[in-house]
Amino acid sequence: MQGSWDEQLPDCCYEHKQPSLIKPCSPTPNHLLYLSNLDDQKFLRFSIKYLYLFEKSVPINLLKQSLSRVLIDYYPLAGRLKNLQPRHEHDDNRLQVDCNGEGAVFAEAFMDMSAQEFLQVSKKPSKSWRKLLFKVDAPTFVDTPPLVVQVTKLRCGGMIICTAINHYLCDGIGTSQFLHAWAHLTRNPTNSVPITPFHSRHVFNPMSPSSHLPFVHPAFTKNANKQTLKDHNLTLNQYLQSQPLVPASLTYTAANIHSLKSQCVPSLKCTTFEVLASHTWRSWAKSLDLEPSLEVKLLFSMNIRNKITPEIPKGYYANGFVLACAKTNVKELVDGNLHHVVKLVQDAKSSLTDDSVSGILLLLEDKNVSTDLATSLVISQWSKLGLESLDFGEGMPLHMGPVSSDIYCLFLPIIGDSNAIRVLVSLPKSVVSKFEYYMNTFLQTNNVLATKIGEKCEFV
């Protein structure tokens, strides 16, 4: 059984018309929390939305109690975003967190479906999955609570837990840290959180005045990219966003990755991420049939907690990453060999030195600077965060992934196989089959499709 993008789940029956607010069960600091330049990027004005499927449910009251307890330590998630008075004339809607203990949104629902039935359609998110996460009626992103949870009980006694965690407050490392802390306190109500979160963001303050911004980084831009896609007067990103998108999903096993690495000629020592990101970037560009001269970029996050002096405290709870950027034109990307593309990715990683990270922090003082998404593929790696090992007391999940799919590419963990990765990205419907085809073949320098991956990738 394979799920389609428009396949409908049964409607959720909410236990209450309105969700409850879960507040910290003890008093927490009441103050305004500064957001660093890494946090306060318009690129991050969204919530990271996770979906977990469990074979057995945990009592709702227990989940609420442990959430109330964990919010003592993770109290900014119980606060609210608010606009800060601009520090400079060019500042625009700089945000901070009002740590007021107002509470996280918690919704309860029931769906007439079994865990195994949902598992059968779990490889590709569908539009109807959005009903599994309560939609807060808020006029703007700023007015949306930083943490929204929905627990949906299933016919079989299982449950689905969906969470929306504000990206302004933390990155993927932070979301995993919080979820594991919540699960830990659900299993062990009298214990402390495994890692004490450190909330001060001043460690990522720019190290020099903002009046002079000489640093340039290819992941950012101050002006819209004027390059066009064929005869469309749009950037590639705008072109993709202007039409209906459907998800492409495929799984790479350890054997697939090994075969992919063997395509790097001459031989090159590289990580799984480097080779799979390179292959995905090439396949994406090839499937979109882009102009050969168009410059395209690959953006991917890199943890910089170990690139700042003094050392970042353990448990640093905020955004601690910057985007690395590999770039080239379409012709070199799709006609060159995989070795060349992997080198581009490796060079992008190695270019993020202490000095360049400091330059990025300073560059982001200018709120006219934004992430350059015009002709970029953005890859976010969820597969190395431990997200799949969440246990609230009734065992590990049967499935872990996003609530929805978009044009950002996700590298997802595979439950039960730590060496496998699922690639998920949304593309125009007419492009998906081409993308999956190229992801399962390798384009040699003479444009002849060569040997397929030793063990064919699983498409769903």
Image (cartoon, rainbow, N blue to C red):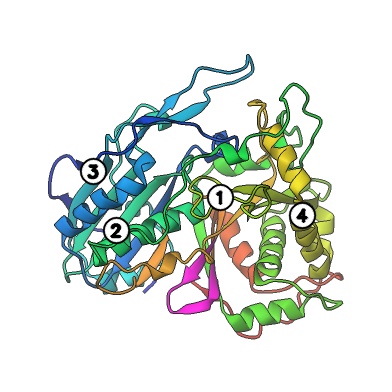
Query: What separation in Å lies between label 4 and label 3 (alpha carbons)?
Result: 45 Å
Task: Please give the name of the residue rendered at 44% of the width and 64% of the height, measured from the top-left corner.
Answer: 387
Residue holding disc 1: 407
Residue holding disc 2: 161
Tell me the element at label 2. Answer: strand
Q: Amino acid at mark 1?
A: Ile
Q: Amino acid at mark 4?
A: Ala
Question: Residue 194 or 97: which is nearer the viewer?
Answer: 194
Q: Is residue 182 above or below residue 391?
A: above
The label shown at residue 348 is 4
Tell me the element at label 4. Answer: helix
Residue 97 image position (x, y, % from top left): 42, 32
Crowding near the residue tagged with mark 4, few <14, some 14–19, many ≥20 C-alpha atoms within 10 Å: some
Pointers 2 and 3 in contact (C-beta within 8 Å): no
Residue holding disc 3: 26
Circle nearer the viewer, 2 or 3: 3
